[in-house]
Image: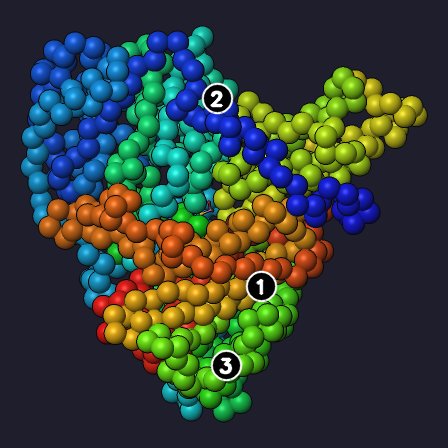
Amino acid sequence: MSDVTARPRAVGLPMDRIDGEQKVTGTATYAYEWPLDQPVYLYPLQSTIAVGRITGVDGALAEAEPGVLAVLSHLNAPTLTRPDDPELAVLQSDEVAWRGQFIGAVVAESLETARRAAGLVRVDYESRPPDVMLRADRDDLYSPVHAAAFGTGGGELQDGSPADSVLGDVETALAASPTMVDATYSTPMYHNNPMEPHTAVVTWSDGELVVRCSSQGVSMSRALISGVLGLEPARVRVVSPHVGGGFGSKVYPHTYAVLAAMAARIVRRPVKFTLTRQQMFALVGYRPATIQRIRLAAGRDGRLTAIAHDVIEQTAKAKGYADQVGVCSRMMYAAPHRRTTHRLAPLDVPVPTIMRAPGEAQGMFALESALDEMAIACGLDPVEFRIRNEPEVHPESGLPFSSRHLTDCLREGARRAGWDRRDPAPRSWRDGRWLVGTGVACSTYPSARFPGNAATIRIGPDGRYTVRIAAADLGTGTWTALTQIAADALSVPVGQVEMRIGDSALPTASVAGASAGINSWGTAIWEAADRLRARLRAEHDSIAPPEGLEVTAELPGGNPEAERYAMHSFGAQFAEVRIDEDTGEVRVARLLGMFDVGRVINPKTARSQLIGGMTQGMSMALFEHSVLDPRFGHVVNHDFAQYHIASHSDVHAVEAHWLDQPDPFTNPMGAKGLGEVGIVGTAAAIANAVHHATGVRIRELPITLDKLV
Ligand code: MOS
């Protein structure tokens, strides 16, 4: 593959979204809006107990309602052929594993009828008291060896990493150290909450199942949905051109799609199903709560000698799921002695899933808070302390980094943030009744390339190029960025490229997850373009490319360079907070992030991704918190009135900058992932600033005023 630098033209330009006009004029068709001939509507039944079994279902009243076509429950649901995934295996038994689990559905001619009839179904249960509280002293903690989420590489944690790692002898190093930090940090349950609720619009025609849904990955959804329904993948098509956000909750298909497909098969009509916001809190995943103990040791020279990161995280009894919370401590800083562990607490709760920077978001809150505590203990500036502990290579694998410009991010970010004016003493800066403080924290996120990608390029009439790949655009700008990449790869203007994505009938693609989208799909497109150019050179001397010529590149593997280099995005985040001395109200006056994300394909959409991540990180720091009721096992604050997400009035100055240093090994574009790195570290930067402002160290998110007064 050649390097993009030979022919950059569109890459690097702040192009407007090519789907932007459709979106702002309301003509972009989202899944639920898809026009269908005589659709019917599904309204689900959810368990009202958290754990136990269903002893009876009486749907007679519901069935008698005019317009009701079917009442589904485990008593009459079709048997799924692969019910080994306990989350997807909907209505396969009388067992209830969490409150709000699907236990049935009503299908009717109108949504109103379905919803009303659902209220008429009588369900009896035998219930047991739920066990939903995460505590470090539980005696049922287990190592996530067999808990890998389906669809990943068979590793122990969801990213495929081993659950534990050991290097040297942490205990001896801690005992011998003149300076030590031993602190426990906790993060609550958070919910993904994309704007567009999860939706499945299902039709069966000519033996083919078409699922129009809101998906971060149509190829994987097709594989998993066809598997659970016992259908040939070729007989299932998943279509998802426009997606109103996902934050990870639309990577794996969830039960709603299977339930809608079941219903459509039974009533032999197209079925429309969309979740309500409240239903989303029980059915499409969330970020699991964590308790993390961090121990650091440092020598008199301010160099870390030991890092221990022991993680306990919430998971579901129904299905094990584990974020790689402590994995960031394997690669961020140099230290000869190191240990990371992950243990899961199985609870009667819904199944967690990936949520923007799964693992790193929680883990870097703890690690970067502890780094701040250690810098203070060593009497060193926290920027200087981090630079002093930069590793030369990946500390555990020994691999060099494909690119790591974290020191530049720290220095340049500090310069832009005016860090040199900072008095390090807590409570040293006051503005009337406001205590003001600043904090810094680092960000990181892997820059992976997923296997299983293919792209096709076809030359059409007028010499236009149609590029086909089953990629997804969550609203992030993928559609536009891929068009820019294709244009440069083909050496044609962007106007000559038509990009088709979001349909499993297109060449297979990996999911829009793990910040690996551009890396994975862009490489496949680049490769297809290279092959097309080679064909043209070999077979055609003419200037005009021949209409109908089509080339496909299949990249079954990931990035072969990943065996030789550790690949990560980095960043340094600076926060300025203002805290009302009397009420403890926290305002974030400024966030400034300086990122190392390789070559930026589109500065406009990249900036949105980064400031969006930082804003979500602020929201994680100050507001968001899913509260479980220990008596009934549900999330109490399951709507936007009670689950507060940062709003415009909470957000002041958020700036994202980047170094624009292409990575030589990640992909031909030189890009690194930037979808998730923006959220990582933000919460720690804010917590560190809160400490600087007040002298109070908050180790338990979110940072609410009751913890400060
Ligand atoms: Mo991201 S949580 O992998 O969509």
How far apart marks 1 and 2 lie (CA) works out to 41 Å
Q: Quadrant of residue 401?
A: bottom right
**SS at mark 3?**
loop
Frontmost residue, 2 versus 483: 483
Mark 1 or 2, nearer chain start: 2
Q: Is mark 1 within 8 Å of ligand 1?
A: no
Compared across the picture, whether 693 is left or right of 470 comes to: left
Frontmost residue, 375 versus 10: 10
Q: Which residue is mark 1?
A: 594
Q: Which residue is mark 2?
A: 237
Can you say which quadrant of the picture contains the C terminus? bottom left
Relative to residue 414, is residue 606 depicted above or below? above
- Dots 3 and 1: beta carbons under 8 Å? no
Residue 666 can be seen, yes or no: no
Mark 3 or 1, nearer chain start: 3
The amino acid at mark 2 is Arg
Frontmost residue, 346 versus 706: 706
- Dots 1 and 2: beta carbons under 8 Å? no
Q: Residue at x 50, y 44 (%)?
A: 513
Residue 62 can be seen, yes or no: yes
Mark 2 or 3, nearer chain start: 2
Compared across the picture, whether 481 is left or right of 69 comes to: right
Relative to residue 318, is residue 610 depicted above or below? below
- Horizontal and vertical percent for residue 164? 41, 63
Q: Quadrant of residue 101?
A: top left
Q: Which residue is mark 3?
A: 422
